[in-house]
Amino acid sequence: MQTKPFRIGTRGSPLALAQAHETRDRLMEAHGFGEDMFEVVVLSTKGDRITDRALSEIGGKGLFTEEIEQQLTSGELDFAVHSSKDMATALPDGLFLSAFLPREDVRDAFIGRSAARLMELPQGATVGSASLRRQALIRRLRPDITTVIFRGQVETRLRKLEEGHVDGTLLAYAGLKRLGKTDVATEILDPEEFPPAPAQGAICVESRIGDSRVNDLLAAINHQPTHDAVTCERAFLRILDGSCRTPIAGLARCEGDRLRFSGMILTPDGQKFHKVEGEGARKDAAAIGQSAGETVLKKAGAGFFENWR
């Protein structure tokens, strides 16, 4: 019987804490535990500390998880809560994504200062975003717009926008919902025209392979449709060597026991892109994503990826 609190690792941003608390609350409800059975452990990551450069320049997505995963591997933490889209496709040995919470809204939100809609921005406007996918999609739709690196917590980006550093910025609508800040969004972008990042809107839980005590606990809150959809999207990303250096979009949707996937790769300037679709049984989610990645790689050709890094 568990006699000490389960230790939950998380980053310290308001959004990360909201996600950790949602996970804790779902576990409390599923198992009838009190809050005293969980301890939220806040860790600072390199990705949080370095905010003046693009992630691609300082090591990619793993910068948001490295310190947390070290403590998870050593046993100092029982499990960790993350934004799924922040997770590298290759995890440290001995760790896996053991549970996914029900997925929130997958769409991107535009927050405009000089115009309410992205397409209504004045000629030559400036948009701030740390995401190469968002930058490429903006350039695809509006080649005249200048994009600049915009990193930091949601509150930091909104403050920079208010101070006039840029004319607009984009954030995941799911994050705004979890922070109770949906009112700041001036436009919710159509995922058909502005497809989301793989795993966007999904909270995942990472734990140790073989730790049945913890994994049995987490199994009670795993949302299988989200698990299957994100598994497909991450398989697509893995084939494309997806990281913060590559503009890649992907979205899987579960329909009964079937799964439909659509993906896109773009050049950083947004002027060349390739789309791909896949469909199959949900139980084959990873294979569907992998096949879609292989198909779009073949379609694009080796030259498509030259000079990306």
Image (cartoon, grey):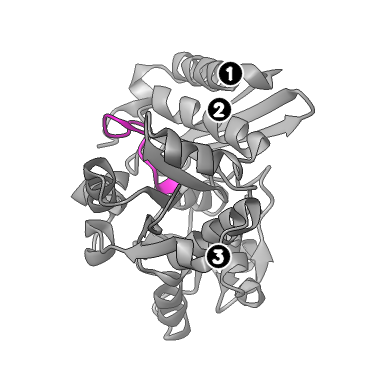
Name the element at disc 3.
loop
Please provide percent x and percent y for residue 105: 66, 53
> What amino acid does circle 2 point to?
Cys
Asked whether residue 51 is in view, the answer is no
Vertical relation: 32 (above or below) 252: below
Per the model, the C-alpha gap separating discs 1 and 2 is: 6 Å
Q: Earlier in the sequence, mark 1 or mark 3?
A: 3
Q: Earlier in the sequence, mark 1 or mark 2?
A: 2
Please provide percent x and percent y for residue 151: 35, 65
Vertical relation: 175 (above or below) 167: above
Please provide percent x and percent y for residue 119: 63, 61
Please provide percent x and percent y for residue 2: 43, 50
Residue at 24%, 37% (x, y): give it: 309
Asked whether residue 244 is in view, the answer is yes
The residue to which callout 2 is attached is 232
Residue at 42%, 73% (x, y): give it: 157
Q: Which of 205 and 64 is in front in this view?
A: 205
Residue with the most extreme right position: 256
Q: In this view, does 145 lie to the left or right of 284?
A: left
Per the model, the C-alpha gap separating discs 3 and 2 is: 35 Å
Magenta highlight range: 85-95
The residue to which callout 1 is attached is 288
The residue to which callout 3 is attached is 34
Main SS class of the magenta portion in the image:
loop
